[in-house]
Amino acid sequence: MAVKKKQFPLIEITLTKSLIGRTKKQRAVISGLGLTKINSKVIREKRPEILGMIQKVGFMLEVKEVKS
């Protein structure tokens, strides 16, 4: 029996502020999202885990919905 996978909408995350002077935890969250430099962008699913990470460092990010 096949399990149906839930589809999540996509969001585009852009790093807008520098990592200089940030705590190790904040740097780890940014790295976990896949961001490296200022203005780097990634596209991720709008999952609860990702939304929690965005909430921790949201002041450094710009988040947009991606129309698919």
Image (cartoon, rainbow, N blue to C red):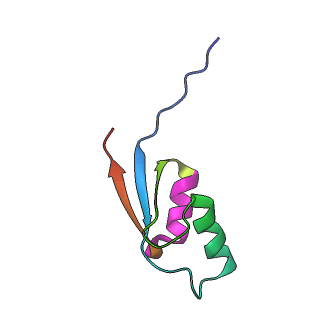
Q: Give the magenta part as a residue range.
A: 49-59
Horizontal side of 26 relative to 61 (left or right) equals: right
Q: Residue at x 56, y 67 (%)?
A: 36
Q: Is residue 56 magenta?
A: yes
**Residue lying at 45% horizontally and 78% vertically, measured from the top left:** 17
Instruction: Name the residue nearer the viewer: 35 or 56.
Output: 35
Classify residue 18 as left or right of residue 2: left
**Image side of residue 56 versus residue 23, left or right:** left
Which corner quadrant of the image does residue 1 belong to?
top right
Q: Is residue 39 magenta?
A: no
Residue 2 place in picture, x, y as percent:
61, 15
- Asked if residue 23 is positioned above or below residue 10 in the image, the reply reads below
**Residue 41 locus on image (x, y percent):** 44, 60
Determine the residue positioned at 57% across, 59% down: 33
Nearest the viewer among 57 and 12 is 12
The quadrant in which residue 62 appears is bottom left
Q: Position of residue 5 (x, y in %)?
A: 55, 27
Give the residue drawn at x 46%, y 73%. Answer: 38
Quadrant for residue 24, please give it: bottom right
Farthest residue to the left: give it.
67
